[in-house]
Amino acid sequence: MSEVEIQGCEMIRGWLSQRCGIHYPEHKMELLRQRLSRVQRAFTVPTLHDLARRLSSDASHELQLAVMHAASTNHTYFFREPEVLQHFRSAILPGLAQRDEIRIWSAACSSGEEAYTLAIMIAEDYGLGALKRTAILGTDISAPVVDQAEAGLFSEHRLAHVPADLQRKYFEPAGLAQYRIRAELRACCTFRQMNLKTTPYPFRKAFQTVFCRNILYYFEQADQIATLNAIHDVTEPGGWLVTSVTENIRDLPSRWQPVDNGIHRKGGH
Ligand SMILES: C[S@@+](CC[C@H](N)C(=O)[O-])C[C@H]1O[C@@H](n2cnc3c(N)ncnc32)[C@H](O)[C@@H]1O
């Protein structure tokens, strides 16, 4: 890469960190360059330097969204990290199920597998009727994955972690080796585009549980702390935060009380 291109890449790296909290360490610069080349082709932007200039000056919203989408890792799958899900299911969900409304936020939901996994667990343990008083919000910075989540359509290989009996119960064939999540589950899940870096979060009613998994480790520490605190603000007293088991937030100065691996609680219950 020429000096000018390296400079362009550095500028975009700074833009991503500032706008989305996504931090690309030095050793991942080549990956960033490859990901950005897709945006360059789609928007016919000849060089990284041009792309950086357009982002910092007259960037269209579409171009900004495309850069955010290209730079983010959307990898996700159903029933990811069974140990934290099991903890949620056995120790937290029974309490939520007694409430008039179950309110859960899947922050950084990608294509919706996490939100739908939670809906499946609620349907399994408390019946499809419980979904009528369940509201699961999924949000992500990347517009294309939010659209995919909303559609609730998954190709066969994406169901690999869904046990066969649950596949039969909760997915309907939709042709071309695609499966659509059942209408009752789709009805209780809402998906929106939202940047976790823009705080405070605009919710009127507090959540009982927030899932924020496999995103914090892309953030720099200051953004991790700001995100944890902003989630704390929109969680009810005694409410829960579920992170990935690989994201240890214990050492960060946040207001969350550690309970178990990946499980944290807000005080005041
Ligand atoms: C690796 S996926 C995690 C999906 C799911 N939570 C899971 O654990 O399987 C990370 C997601 O975070 C999203 N993301 C990255 N930066 C974000 C930000 N600033 N605000 C909201 N979402 C963001 C990405 O678009 C991506 O879909």
Image: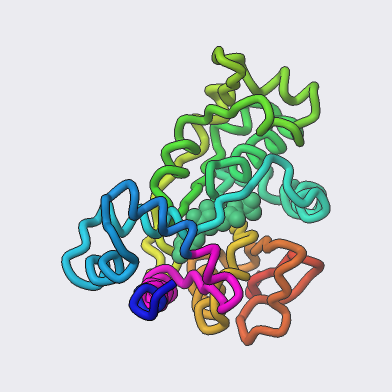
| Res. 147 in view | yes
- Residue in view at x 52 percent, y 74 percent: 23
Viewer-closest of 41 and 210: 41
Where residue 182 sits in the image (x, y, percent)?
58, 22
Percent position of residue 205, x then y: 44, 57
Please tell me whether residue 18 belongs to the stretch shown in magenta: yes
Residue 228 in the image: x percent, y percent?
Answer: 56, 73
Ligand 1, image quadrant it occupies: bottom right
Q: Is residue 12 left or right of residue 109?
A: left
Residues shaded magenta: 9-32
Q: The N terminus appears in which quarter of the rendering?
A: bottom left
Q: Residue furthest left?
A: 58
- The residue at 54%/67% (across/down) is 30
Q: Is residue 130 left or right of residue 186?
A: right
Q: Is residue 164 magenta?
A: no
- Please give left or right for residue 213 compared with residue 226 in the image: right
Location of residue 123 with respect to 26 vertically, above or below? above
Frontmost residue, 17 versus 105: 17
Residue 200 visible in image? no
Q: Is residue 211 left or right of residue 39?
A: right
